[in-house]
Amino acid sequence: MNDILPPDSARWEWLEGVIRSLMDRYAYRNIRTPIVEPTALFVRGLGEVTDIVEKEMYSFEDRLNGEHLSLRPEATAGVVRAVSENSLLYDGGKRLYYMGPMFRHERPQRGRYRQFHQIGAEALGFPGAEIDAELILLANALWHELGLQNVRLELNSLGQPHERQAHRVALISYLQQHSALLDEEARRRLHSNPLRILDTKNPAMQDVVNAAPRLIDFLGAESLTHFETVTAILDANDIAWTLNPRLVRGMDYYNLTVFEFVTDQLGSQGTICGGGRYDYLMEQVGAKAAPAVGWALGVERVLELLKEQGKVLAAPACDVYAIIPNAASLPAAIKAIEAMRAAGTSVQMHASAASGAGMGSMKSQFKRADSSGAAYAVVFGEDEMARGVVSVKSLRDGSGAQVEQALSDVSSWAPNLQSRATN
Ligand code: ATP
Ligand code: MG
């Protein structure tokens, strides 16, 4: 679990800002659900035989009433619960997005943490393939806006439960024939959740799962049409994709379209975003049935990939550093600084240091002003203030040019000092 500190936190805020603006253009609205949910919601929603439910959840008993609770390992189940409890689908489908921390007890490594952050989009109440495509286009537009490259889209269809049943029989029989090649986990899941075996990360099992019966070959006409409608929209929008018949995703709740955005630049944690259709989840958690589809991206992985690709942000800096040589000037200086801020100018005020005596010398204050990255220093000198003025010095152009400005007129000159770099 990581602390996210400045200046790095500025990258997080930038990413969140880009996503908010994009969600707005696709008409997705923000939803915020609790971090803690009843454990049963995840067990029923994600499936009993999944990595998350079997071994990754932070679960505990409420000391006061014995309720079984878990820190959310993902947000879709909570969104579905909230949509149902608040009857959000009474007047048609809803497009929603969320941002926030998720918790999974995994082995920490690059791109894999125990508290990590997801941003996700969900469209509930829409059965059509056009919404699957819309969500994929939305994610793709995001990579574009962020300037991310080398992200490829993998698609699969998990069909419907009856089609999965036929595939399951074929898959179990195939895996039984190759049982010598299966690891312990795969043997354990052979009858409880054979599909999940296709998702194995064990290098020794790649050949055997690659040659396994493909779910897509078991799909009927309707499921195939759904898949082809999605891919036709992607093709028309010049979105490259590949079929990955082994793509099954980590939760049991998916059906029909599933997808992942993958990169080769993050080692083995290469999936930056994954999602799919989950038409049966509402029912599964005890809500009124409704079709739905969504995705979630891993914020840490997206930021890491941006870094890997050399995308740097200018370190955040203020417009103005306020230099206040004499403590006696503080009340009047701060009044003027407040007026500058009200006019939209960002001001970092010099403050006395824990170690030093009082406000510190002019020289040391100027030093701080330089290292703050501010474009201007505004000096609240005692003599100048007695004359009703301050001096404004440019810190960036090397000229050291200095002009006087009237204290009585802050709101007219302060906006001219706004020079922050925007990314
Ligand atoms: P993986 O196969 O890497 O374990 P997953 O299938 O468990 O991923 P999802 O539950 O689909 O992942 O979550 C969506 C995205 O959230 C992932 O594609 C990934 O970018 C991110 N993610 C998942 N688990 C973690 C984690 N422990 N640390 C950081 N990011 C994560
Ligand atoms: Mg996982």
Image: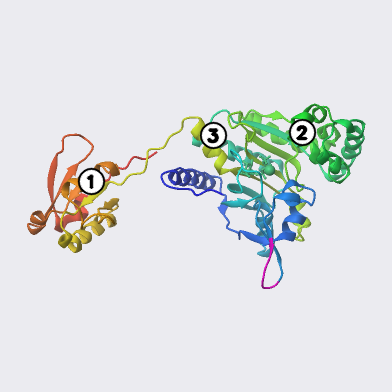
The answer to whether marks 2 and 1 mark residues whose Cβ atoms lie closer than 8 Å is no
| 147 or 8, nearer to the observer | 8
Q: Is residue 43 left or right of residue 98?
A: right
Report x, y in % for residue 39.
72, 60
Residues at marks 3 and 1 touching, judged by CB atoms closer than 8 Å: no
Residue 324 in view of the camera: yes
| Sequence-earlier tag: 3 or 1 | 3
Ligand 2, what quadrant?
top right
**Do residues under tags 3 and 2 come within 8 Å of each other at their CB atoms?**
no
Q: Is residue 38 above or below residue 23?
A: below
Q: Which residue is mark 1?
A: 416
247 to 329, vertically: above or below: above
**Scheme of colours in the image:** rainbow
- Residue at the image point whose x is 55% and y is 42% from the top: 300
Identify residue for label 3. 305
Q: Residues within 10 Å of mark 1 (few under 14, many from 20)?
A: few
- Image point 20% across, 56% down: which residue? 359
- Counting residues from the N terminus, which is met first, the one under dot 3 or under dot 2? 2
Highlighted magenta segment, given as a residue range: 60-65
Q: Residues within 10 Å of mark 3 (few under 14, many from 20)?
A: many
Is residue 75 one of those drawn in magenta? Answer: no
Closer to the eye: label 3 or 2: 3
Judged by its main secondary structure, the magenta piece is loop
- Per the image, label 1 sits on a secondary structure element best described as helix
Disc 3 C-beta below 8 A from ligand 1: no
Residue shown at 78%/36% (left/top)?
A: 225
63 in magenta? yes
Relative to 279, 386 lies left or right? left
Mark carried by residue 246: 2
Residue type beneath disc 1: Asn
How far apart marks 3 and 2 lie (CA) works out to: 24 Å
